[in-house]
Image (cartoon, rainbow, N blue to C red):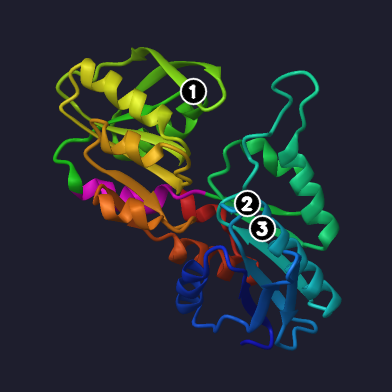
Amino acid sequence: MFKSTCIFTGNSNPSLAEKISNYLELPVGRARVSRFSDGEVFAKIKENVRGVDVYLIQSTCAPVNDNLMELLVMIDALRRASAGSITAVIPYYGYARQDRKAAPRTPITAKLVADLLTTSGIDRVVSMDLHAGQIQGFFNKPFDHLYAMPVFLQHLRPRFRTPPVFVSPDAGGVERTRAYAKRMGAELAIIDKRRELENVSEVMNIIGDVNGRECVILDDMIDTAGTITNAARALQEQGAKRIMAAATHPVLSGPALERIVDSPLEEVIVTDTIPLREEAIATGGFRVLSVASLLGEAIKRIHHSDSVSSLFV
Protein backbone atom coordinates (compact mmCIF):
# COMPACT_ATOMS: atom_id res chain seq x y z
CA MET A 1 0.00 0.00 0.00
CA PHE A 2 2.86 2.36 0.74
CA LYS A 3 3.66 2.42 -2.97
CA SER A 4 0.25 3.96 -3.77
CA THR A 5 -0.27 6.23 -0.77
CA CYS A 6 1.74 7.45 2.20
CA ILE A 7 1.55 9.79 5.17
CA PHE A 8 4.06 12.42 6.22
CA THR A 9 4.04 14.86 9.09
CA GLY A 10 5.85 17.97 10.22
CA ASN A 11 6.71 18.83 13.81
CA SER A 12 3.43 20.46 14.85
CA ASN A 13 1.51 17.35 15.94
CA PRO A 14 3.41 14.08 15.37
CA SER A 15 1.30 12.18 17.93
CA LEU A 16 -1.88 12.81 15.93
CA ALA A 17 -0.13 11.70 12.73
CA GLU A 18 0.96 8.50 14.48
CA LYS A 19 -2.63 7.77 15.55
CA ILE A 20 -3.88 8.38 12.01
CA SER A 21 -1.22 6.06 10.60
CA ASN A 22 -2.25 3.37 13.09
CA TYR A 23 -5.88 3.72 12.00
CA LEU A 24 -4.88 3.41 8.33
CA GLU A 25 -2.32 0.69 9.09
CA LEU A 26 0.28 2.68 7.18
CA PRO A 27 3.67 3.80 8.50
CA VAL A 28 4.48 7.49 8.74
CA GLY A 29 6.91 8.27 5.94
CA ARG A 30 10.46 9.15 6.88
CA ALA A 31 11.30 12.84 6.59
CA ARG A 32 13.64 15.25 8.31
CA VAL A 33 12.45 18.77 9.07
CA SER A 34 15.13 20.86 10.71
CA ARG A 35 16.44 24.41 11.04
CA PHE A 36 19.58 26.09 9.86
CA SER A 37 21.44 28.12 12.48
CA ASP A 38 19.66 31.29 11.34
CA GLY A 39 16.22 29.68 11.76
CA GLU A 40 15.52 28.80 8.13
CA VAL A 41 13.40 25.65 7.67
CA PHE A 42 14.90 22.71 5.81
CA ALA A 43 13.06 19.53 4.81
CA LYS A 44 14.28 16.29 3.27
CA ILE A 45 11.94 13.48 2.22
CA LYS A 46 13.62 10.14 2.88
CA GLU A 47 11.20 8.00 0.86
CA ASN A 48 10.67 7.48 -2.86
CA VAL A 49 7.35 9.28 -3.46
CA ARG A 50 7.41 9.36 -7.25
CA GLY A 51 3.81 8.87 -8.39
CA VAL A 52 2.60 8.34 -4.80
CA ASP A 53 -0.53 9.99 -3.34
CA VAL A 54 0.82 11.84 -0.31
CA TYR A 55 -1.15 13.03 2.74
CA LEU A 56 0.83 15.61 4.69
CA ILE A 57 -0.47 16.16 8.24
CA GLN A 58 0.42 19.48 9.83
CA SER A 59 -1.59 21.80 12.09
CA THR A 60 -0.63 25.45 11.78
CA CYS A 61 -0.82 25.99 15.55
CA ALA A 62 1.69 27.80 17.75
CA PRO A 63 4.35 28.61 16.76
CA VAL A 64 2.07 29.41 13.84
CA ASN A 65 4.60 30.90 11.43
CA ASP A 66 7.14 28.12 12.00
CA ASN A 67 4.57 25.37 11.46
CA LEU A 68 3.11 27.08 8.41
CA MET A 69 6.56 27.45 6.88
CA GLU A 70 7.33 23.78 7.61
CA LEU A 71 4.14 22.84 5.77
CA LEU A 72 5.02 24.95 2.73
CA VAL A 73 8.60 23.71 2.57
CA MET A 74 7.55 20.05 2.87
CA ILE A 75 4.93 20.50 0.13
CA ASP A 76 7.59 21.99 -2.14
CA ALA A 77 9.96 19.12 -1.37
CA LEU A 78 7.26 16.55 -2.15
CA ARG A 79 6.27 18.30 -5.38
CA ARG A 80 9.88 18.40 -6.55
CA ALA A 81 10.18 14.70 -5.66
CA SER A 82 7.40 14.03 -8.21
CA ALA A 83 4.68 12.98 -5.78
CA GLY A 84 1.57 11.87 -7.66
CA SER A 85 -0.69 14.11 -5.58
CA ILE A 86 -0.29 16.11 -2.37
CA THR A 87 -3.14 16.52 0.11
CA ALA A 88 -2.48 18.97 2.93
CA VAL A 89 -4.28 17.67 6.03
CA ILE A 90 -4.46 20.73 8.28
CA PRO A 91 -6.50 19.79 11.37
CA TYR A 92 -6.20 23.36 12.68
CA TYR A 93 -6.05 26.13 10.07
CA GLY A 94 -4.11 29.06 11.50
CA TYR A 95 -4.95 32.66 10.54
CA ALA A 96 -8.58 31.56 10.01
CA ARG A 97 -9.93 34.49 12.04
CA GLN A 98 -8.51 36.94 9.50
CA ASP A 99 -11.10 35.91 6.92
CA ARG A 100 -12.38 39.39 5.96
CA LYS A 101 -11.52 43.09 6.16
CA ALA A 102 -12.84 43.89 9.63
CA ALA A 103 -11.50 47.45 9.41
CA PRO A 104 -9.95 49.69 6.74
CA ARG A 105 -6.40 48.89 5.60
CA THR A 106 -6.32 45.41 7.14
CA PRO A 107 -5.33 42.13 5.43
CA ILE A 108 -7.35 39.02 4.65
CA THR A 109 -4.60 36.69 5.84
CA ALA A 110 -6.67 33.52 5.60
CA LYS A 111 -6.77 34.12 1.83
CA LEU A 112 -3.04 34.85 1.77
CA VAL A 113 -2.36 31.49 3.47
CA ALA A 114 -4.63 29.79 0.92
CA ASP A 115 -2.65 31.39 -1.93
CA LEU A 116 0.65 30.28 -0.37
CA LEU A 117 -0.57 26.70 -0.05
CA THR A 118 -1.90 26.64 -3.61
CA THR A 119 1.32 28.09 -5.03
CA SER A 120 3.42 25.58 -3.08
CA GLY A 121 1.81 22.74 -5.03
CA ILE A 122 -1.09 21.14 -3.13
CA ASP A 123 -3.82 19.22 -4.94
CA ARG A 124 -6.35 19.09 -2.09
CA VAL A 125 -6.89 20.41 1.44
CA VAL A 126 -8.50 18.69 4.41
CA SER A 127 -9.25 20.72 7.52
CA MET A 128 -11.51 20.54 10.56
CA ASP A 129 -13.99 23.01 12.08
CA LEU A 130 -12.84 26.14 10.29
CA HIS A 131 -13.45 29.37 12.16
CA ALA A 132 -15.14 30.69 9.01
CA GLY A 133 -16.62 28.30 6.45
CA GLN A 134 -16.03 30.71 3.56
CA ILE A 135 -12.30 29.94 3.75
CA GLN A 136 -13.10 26.92 1.57
CA GLY A 137 -13.84 29.38 -1.23
CA PHE A 138 -10.37 30.92 -0.94
CA PHE A 139 -8.99 27.81 -2.65
CA ASN A 140 -9.30 26.82 -6.29
CA LYS A 141 -8.55 23.26 -5.20
CA PRO A 142 -10.84 20.61 -3.69
CA PHE A 143 -11.41 21.29 -0.01
CA ASP A 144 -12.85 18.77 2.46
CA HIS A 145 -14.20 20.49 5.58
CA LEU A 146 -14.56 17.99 8.44
CA TYR A 147 -16.42 18.40 11.72
CA ALA A 148 -15.51 17.07 15.16
CA MET A 149 -19.23 16.77 15.98
CA PRO A 150 -19.45 12.93 15.75
CA VAL A 151 -16.56 12.61 18.23
CA PHE A 152 -18.10 15.08 20.67
CA LEU A 153 -21.58 13.58 20.46
CA GLN A 154 -20.28 10.07 21.07
CA HIS A 155 -18.67 11.38 24.26
CA LEU A 156 -21.56 13.59 25.41
CA ARG A 157 -24.59 11.34 24.86
CA PRO A 158 -23.91 8.90 27.74
CA ARG A 159 -23.14 11.73 30.18
CA PHE A 160 -26.65 13.18 30.43
CA ARG A 161 -29.87 11.52 31.53
CA THR A 162 -31.81 14.27 29.78
CA PRO A 163 -30.44 16.31 26.88
CA PRO A 164 -28.50 19.41 28.00
CA VAL A 165 -28.94 22.93 26.68
CA PHE A 166 -26.36 23.58 23.97
CA VAL A 167 -25.13 27.16 24.17
CA SER A 168 -23.65 29.20 21.34
CA PRO A 169 -21.22 31.78 22.79
CA ASP A 170 -21.97 34.23 19.96
CA ALA A 171 -24.25 34.71 16.96
CA GLY A 172 -21.67 33.26 14.57
CA GLY A 173 -21.77 29.85 16.23
CA VAL A 174 -25.54 29.37 16.12
CA GLU A 175 -25.52 27.08 13.08
CA ARG A 176 -22.92 24.80 14.68
CA THR A 177 -24.79 24.71 18.00
CA ARG A 178 -28.13 24.03 16.30
CA ALA A 179 -26.61 21.00 14.57
CA TYR A 180 -25.59 19.52 17.94
CA ALA A 181 -28.97 20.30 19.52
CA LYS A 182 -30.83 18.71 16.60
CA ARG A 183 -28.87 15.46 16.82
CA MET A 184 -29.40 15.14 20.58
CA GLY A 185 -32.96 16.43 20.66
CA ALA A 186 -31.79 19.22 22.94
CA GLU A 187 -32.64 22.90 23.39
CA LEU A 188 -30.56 25.81 22.18
CA ALA A 189 -29.42 29.00 23.90
CA ILE A 190 -27.47 31.93 22.46
CA ILE A 191 -25.13 34.40 24.13
CA ASP A 192 -25.55 37.94 22.82
CA LYS A 193 -21.91 39.03 22.90
CA ARG A 194 -20.47 42.41 22.02
CA ARG A 195 -16.73 42.66 21.35
CA GLU A 196 -15.18 46.11 21.78
CA LEU A 197 -11.50 45.15 21.38
CA GLU A 198 -9.60 42.17 19.91
CA ASN A 199 -9.43 39.22 22.34
CA VAL A 200 -11.82 41.05 24.71
CA SER A 201 -15.48 39.99 24.87
CA GLU A 202 -18.44 41.18 26.89
CA VAL A 203 -21.61 39.16 27.51
CA MET A 204 -24.78 41.19 27.18
CA ASN A 205 -27.74 38.78 27.19
CA ILE A 206 -28.79 35.13 27.09
CA ILE A 207 -31.46 34.07 24.61
CA GLY A 208 -33.07 30.88 25.90
CA ASP A 209 -33.97 29.26 29.23
CA VAL A 210 -31.00 27.85 31.17
CA ASN A 211 -32.33 28.08 34.73
CA GLY A 212 -31.74 24.77 36.54
CA ARG A 213 -30.39 23.17 33.37
CA GLU A 214 -27.16 21.42 32.41
CA CYS A 215 -25.37 23.50 29.76
CA VAL A 216 -22.67 22.77 27.18
CA ILE A 217 -21.00 25.79 25.59
CA LEU A 218 -19.85 24.98 22.05
CA ASP A 219 -17.14 26.77 20.08
CA ASP A 220 -14.66 26.01 17.32
CA MET A 221 -11.65 27.10 19.38
CA ILE A 222 -10.55 28.38 22.77
CA ASP A 223 -7.90 31.06 22.40
CA THR A 224 -7.67 33.43 25.38
CA ALA A 225 -10.82 31.81 26.87
CA GLY A 226 -12.52 35.16 27.43
CA THR A 227 -15.55 34.15 25.39
CA ILE A 228 -16.33 30.83 27.08
CA THR A 229 -15.52 31.97 30.64
CA ASN A 230 -17.70 35.08 30.29
CA ALA A 231 -20.43 32.88 28.86
CA ALA A 232 -20.06 30.42 31.75
CA ARG A 233 -20.43 33.19 34.33
CA ALA A 234 -23.49 34.56 32.56
CA LEU A 235 -25.06 31.07 32.54
CA GLN A 236 -24.27 30.68 36.24
CA GLU A 237 -25.95 34.01 36.99
CA GLN A 238 -29.02 32.81 35.11
CA GLY A 239 -29.24 29.70 37.31
CA ALA A 240 -27.55 27.01 35.20
CA LYS A 241 -27.03 23.90 37.31
CA ARG A 242 -23.95 22.50 35.57
CA ILE A 243 -21.73 24.09 32.94
CA MET A 244 -19.12 22.55 30.66
CA ALA A 245 -17.53 23.62 27.39
CA ALA A 246 -16.56 21.77 24.22
CA ALA A 247 -14.25 23.22 21.58
CA THR A 248 -12.36 21.55 18.76
CA HIS A 249 -9.11 23.51 18.87
CA PRO A 250 -7.38 24.16 22.26
CA VAL A 251 -5.25 27.17 21.24
CA LEU A 252 -5.07 28.35 24.90
CA SER A 253 -2.95 31.46 24.54
CA GLY A 254 -2.24 34.21 27.04
CA PRO A 255 -4.32 34.05 30.25
CA ALA A 256 -6.56 31.21 29.00
CA LEU A 257 -5.66 28.63 31.65
CA GLU A 258 -6.02 31.04 34.56
CA ARG A 259 -9.40 32.18 33.28
CA ILE A 260 -10.67 28.61 32.88
CA VAL A 261 -9.46 27.56 36.34
CA ASP A 262 -11.21 30.57 37.91
CA SER A 263 -14.45 30.05 35.96
CA PRO A 264 -17.60 28.02 36.80
CA LEU A 265 -16.72 25.50 34.07
CA GLU A 266 -16.85 21.94 35.39
CA GLU A 267 -14.93 20.51 32.44
CA VAL A 268 -13.52 21.60 29.10
CA ILE A 269 -13.64 19.00 26.32
CA VAL A 270 -11.23 19.49 23.42
CA THR A 271 -9.69 17.42 20.63
CA ASP A 272 -6.12 16.64 19.66
CA THR A 273 -6.04 18.80 16.50
CA ILE A 274 -3.56 20.85 18.57
CA PRO A 275 -1.32 19.22 21.20
CA LEU A 276 -2.62 20.16 24.66
CA ARG A 277 -0.11 22.13 26.71
CA GLU A 278 1.40 20.39 29.74
CA GLU A 279 0.11 23.14 32.02
CA ALA A 280 -3.43 22.49 30.80
CA ILE A 281 -3.12 18.76 31.46
CA ALA A 282 -1.89 19.53 34.98
CA THR A 283 -5.06 21.47 35.83
CA GLY A 284 -7.15 18.29 35.50
CA GLY A 285 -10.03 20.25 34.01
CA PHE A 286 -9.52 19.17 30.40
CA ARG A 287 -10.70 16.07 28.57
CA VAL A 288 -9.01 15.35 25.23
CA LEU A 289 -10.85 13.39 22.54
CA SER A 290 -8.95 12.11 19.52
CA VAL A 291 -10.08 12.92 15.99
CA ALA A 292 -7.50 10.55 14.49
CA SER A 293 -10.05 7.93 13.40
CA LEU A 294 -12.23 10.64 11.82
CA LEU A 295 -9.31 12.10 9.89
CA GLY A 296 -8.06 8.62 9.01
CA GLU A 297 -11.46 7.59 7.67
CA ALA A 298 -11.66 10.79 5.63
CA ILE A 299 -8.23 10.10 4.12
CA LYS A 300 -9.29 6.54 3.29
CA ARG A 301 -12.48 7.73 1.59
CA ILE A 302 -10.69 10.45 -0.35
CA HIS A 303 -8.14 7.94 -1.57
CA HIS A 304 -10.84 5.50 -2.69
CA SER A 305 -13.07 8.27 -4.14
CA ASP A 306 -15.84 7.55 -1.64
CA SER A 307 -18.19 10.06 0.01
CA VAL A 308 -16.72 12.11 2.87
CA SER A 309 -19.90 14.06 3.69
CA SER A 310 -21.68 10.82 4.69
CA LEU A 311 -19.48 10.78 7.80
CA PHE A 312 -21.58 13.63 9.20
CA VAL A 313 -25.13 12.65 8.25
- Which numbered disc, 2 or 1, marks the residue that appears first in the sequence? 2
Main SS of the magenta part reads helix
Q: Secondary structure at mark 3?
A: helix
Q: Secondary structure at mark 1?
A: strand
Q: Amino acid at mark 2?
A: Val
Percent across and percent down for residue 27 are 55, 84
Do the numbered discs 2 and 3 sit on residues whose CB atoms are within 8 Å? yes
Percent across and percent down for residue 244 are 27, 37
Residue at left offset 77%, top offset 62%: 123
Question: In the orientation shown, which residue stands out farthest toward the front?
Answer: 37
Q: Amino acid at mark 1?
A: Val
Question: Left or right of 164: which side holds 141?
Answer: right
Residue annotated with mark 3: 66
Label 1 neighbour load within 10 Å: few <14, some 14-19, many 20+: few
Alpha-carbon span between mark 2 and mark 1: 21 Å
Q: Is 190 rendered above or below residue 117? A: above
Q: Is 168 rendered above or below residue 104? A: below
Do the numbered discs 1 and 3 sit on residues whose CB atoms are within 8 Å? no
Q: Is 229 rendered above or below residue 71? A: above
Label 2 neighbour load within 10 Å: few <14, some 14-19, many 20+: some
Q: Amino acid at mark 3?
A: Asp
Percent across and percent down for residue 225 are 41, 34
Residue at left offset 66%, top offset 80%: 31
Q: Which disc number belongs to residue 200?
A: 1
Is 157 magenta? The answer is yes
Residue at left offset 65%, top offset 70%: 55
Is 76 magenta? The answer is no
- Which numbered disc, 1 or 3, marks the residue that appears first in the sequence? 3
Q: Is residue 140 visible?
A: no
Bounds of the magenta segment: 147-158
Q: Which disc number belongs to residue 281?
A: none
